Amino acid sequence: MENLKSRLGLLTTLIILVVIIWVLSAVFIIYGLDNWSDRGTFGDLFGAVNGLFSGLAFAGLIYTIVLQKRDLQMQRDEIRMNRAELKKSSKAQEKSEKALSEQVEQMKITSKLNALNTIINYYNLQITSPNTSPENLLKFKEKRRETIKEIDQLINRVGDEEID
């Protein structure tokens, strides 16, 4: 913002200076030269200066266009960098999401294994209990075998997923 204010102040100063010189030259021509033919000759002398100032103005215009082009290129480069950073951030977010999803799956399997282990412990207590009838003893042993098979299947499935 400061830079813009200083540029506007410089531009205003230059415009005022040009207008003052223009007015002073008109005053000099009117009061300094009495004859119209002298005034015309004197005015013709400034034709080359007019061309010089027109050329300088054109050069300033080209310089301004070059500066604007450079600024636009810098903005485009910055936008490209921001897009690249956003893509990297997005990929990192996707990896993190995938890792969290895998972690949740592992936690589900661990919870299931813990629950199955608790069930097996219950069956073991029932099997070792002296109060268990022979019929129930056979049922508990069969259920314990089924639970152990389920644990084996769960462990094998986890191993197969890791191989993929």
Image (cartoon, rainbow, N blue to C red):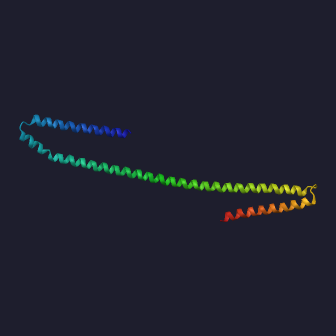
Q: Is residue 25 above or below residue 156?
A: above
Q: Position of residue 40 (x, y in %)?
A: 9, 42
Quarter location, residue 146? bottom right
Task: Choose between 116 and 9: the one closer to the eye.
Answer: 116
Residue sitting at x 17%, y 35%: 24
Does residue 100 appear left or right of residue 42 in this picture?
right
Q: Is residue 142 left or right of residue 101?
A: right
Tell me where residue 153 sits by quadrant.
Answer: bottom right
**Residue nearest the viewer, comparing 151 with 29:** 151
Question: Taking 60 as reference, is 92 left or right?
Answer: right
- Residue 152 at what x, y percent from top left? 77, 63
Q: Please tell me which residue is depicted at 13% across the width and 36% down the height of the picture.
A: 28
Residue pictured at 28% horizontal, 37% vertical = 12
Which quadrant holds the N terminus?
top left
> With respect to residue 7, does 126 lie above or below?
below
Residue 38 coordinates in the image, percent (x, y): 7, 41
